[in-house]
Amino acid sequence: MSSLRFQLDLDRLGELIKADPNLIEVREYKDGTKHRMVKFSIMERKQPSDRGATHYIKADMYHKTEVSGVNYYLSDCYPISFGKKLGETGIQQASQSPVDSLPF
C-alpha cells in the first residue's frame, strides 16, 4: 500500500457541515467526555488526474442519506515517497544530497 498526501481545507469542511449537519456524529466515551466526529473515505480514482492525484477524500455518510445537491468531495490525494521526489530513485540523488554540504 502506498502513502498518500492531501490538504484538508477546514473552511470547506465547515461549509459542508453547515450544508449537512448530519455529518457530525457525537460519541460519548466511558469517562463522560463527548467527541464530535466526522468520518472520511479515501477513494481511488479510475484514472490519475492531470496533476497526478490518484485518490480523493470525501466526507462519508456511513449508513446515512446524503443531502441532494451537496458535494461531499474535500480534496485530492497524491502518492508520496519518503525521502525522495516522485520519479527519483534515491540512488542517483544520494551523492547530490544537500546534507553532504553541511559544515557539521
Image (tube, rainbow, N blue to C red):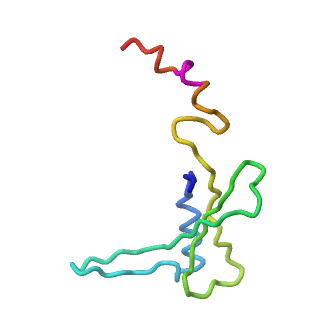
Residue 14 belongs to the span the image colors magenta: no
Residue 99 higher or lower than 62, as above or below: above
Q: Where is residue 79 in the image (x, y as percent from the top left)?
A: 61, 50
Residue 95 belongs to the span the image colors magenta: yes
Main SS, magenta region, reads helix
What residue sits 67% from the left and 36% below the top? 87
Quarter of the rendering containing residue 61: bottom right
Q: Nearer the viewer, residue 34 or 79?
A: 79
Q: Which quadrant holds the N terminus?
A: bottom right
What residue sits 61% from the left and 88% below the top? 65
Q: Position of residue 62 (x, y in %)?
A: 54, 82
* Left or right: residue 17 compared with residue 50: left
Residue with the most extreme top position: 103
Q: Position of residue 18 (x, y in %)?
A: 56, 75
Residue 65 higher or lower than 48, as above or below: below
* Left or right: residue 21 compared with residue 88: left
Q: How many labels does the image show?
A: 0
Residue with the most extreme left position: 31
Quarter of the rendering containing residue 93: top right
Residue 63 higher or lower than 91, as above or below: below
What residue sits 52% from the left and 78% below the top? 23
Q: Which quadrant holds the C terminus?
A: top left
Q: Position of residue 78 (x, y in %)?
A: 63, 51
Please state the extent of the stretch shown in magenta in the rendering. 93-97
Q: Nearer the viewer, residue 82 or 38?
A: 82
Q: Nearer the viewer, residue 8 or 1?
A: 1
